[in-house]
Image (cartoon, grey):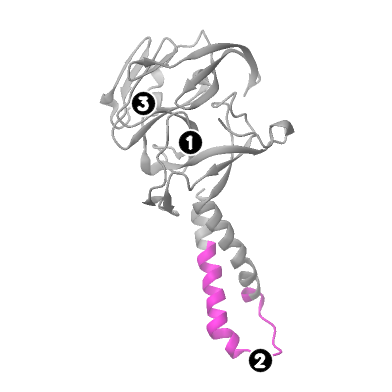
Amino acid sequence: MNFALIMFVLLVITGAITALDRYVLSRRRAAHEREPWWIEYPKSFFPVILVVFLLRSFLVEPFKIPSGSMMPTLLVGDFILVNKYTYGIRIPVINHKVLDVHQPQRGEVVVFRYPDDPSLDYIKRLVGMPGDRVTYKNKELTINGEKIKATTDGNYSYIESGLSFVSATRYQEELGAHRHAILTQSEIPAVRLEGVMSFPKRNNCNYDESGFSCVVPPGHYFMMGDNRDSSSDSRYWGFVPDQNIVGKAFLIWWNFDELKRIGHSIE
C-alpha cells in the first residue's frame, strides 16, 4: 500500500472541496445556513492532512520493524523515526530528488524502496558506496582491500519466527564513523548461493563457496543487514539505486514489548 499516494489523494480532495467552498459555495449559502457534512468534514480534515503530508514527505516518517534482519540494532516491533531531509528533498509520491543536502554515508542505517518491488520499504545498513569494492568471504567484510574491524562481543540468543531458537556470535563492527553490533552464525555460509537472484549489474559481482566480491556501480549502494545470516540484502537481490533511498533511521520512539528501548538513537 502506497501510503504517500493515499495521503496525496486525500489532500487533493479535501483541498479542492475547501477551496470550492471558500470561493464559490459559501457565497451562495444564507448567513444562518449550516455547511453540509460533505463540506464540513473535508474542511476540518484538510489542515491536519496537509501538516501530516508535509511532515512525512519532507522531514520525518515513522516505520515499524517487521523482521529480525537488523538485530541486535533493531528488534521486531521497534517503531522508528526516519529523517527524510538529510539525504535531500524529493518530490512526494514519485520520489524524485530536487535538492541535494547530504549523501548517504557508509555505516548509516537506511530505509529504501526494495529495488525489485518499490512498493516495499526495506531497512539495512549501508556497507558499500558507489565505486567501492565490497568483499565478504568467510564472514569477514573487506572494503576496497581494507578489512573492517570486528571484535568478538559474546553470544546472542533469540527466538526466530516459527519458535526456532537461534544462537549467534555477537561482534562490534567499526564501519565508517559508526560502531555497531552484528550477529553471525558459524554453521551458515557467508552467502547461500542458491538464493542469489539475477539482478541488474549482476556481472559486477563474483560469487563462490566462501562468499562474494562486488564493485558498486555509480549511483548505487550496497546494503547488508546487521543480522548477517538472517538477512535478505544486496548479496541476494543487488544494488540499491539512489532514487530508491527514503531516509536515514535515527531514533527508536516506541516498542510495546520493551519500553526501555524508547528514545534510543540508532547507530
N-term-proximal mark, 3 vs 1: 1
Image vertical order of residue 13 relative to residue 191, above or below:
below
Q: Is residue 158 visible?
A: yes
Identify the magenta region.
10-39
Q: For the residues marked 2 and 3, what is the alpha-carbon distance in whole angstroms?
A: 66 Å
Name the quarter where the C terminus is drawn: top right
Q: Residues within 10 Å of mark 3 (few under 14, many from 20)?
A: few
**How far is mark 3 from mark 1, CA to CA?**
22 Å
Mark 3: amino acid: Met
Residue 35 position in % (x across, y down): 66, 81
Determine whether, in the image, residue 198 is placed left or right of residue 234.
left
Q: Nearer the viewer, residue 264 or 124?
A: 264
The image quadrant that residue 44 belongs to is: bottom right
How many residues crowd mark 2 within 10 Å: few (<14), some (14–19), many (20+)? few
- Residue 13 falls within the magenta-colored stretch: yes
Q: Amino acid at mark 1?
A: Val
User: Which residue does the numbered mark 1 point to in the structure image?
Assistant: 110
Q: Secondary structure at mark 3?
A: loop
Place of residue 144 in the rendered image (x, y in percent of width and height, measured from the top left): 33, 20
Q: For this view, does 136 lie left or right of residue 179?
A: left
Specify the principal SS of the magenta part. helix
Q: Which residue is mark 3?
A: 197
The residue depicted at 42 percent of the width and 41 percent of the height is 245
Kindly report the distance in space between the C-alpha atoms of the residues bearing marks 1 and 2. 55 Å
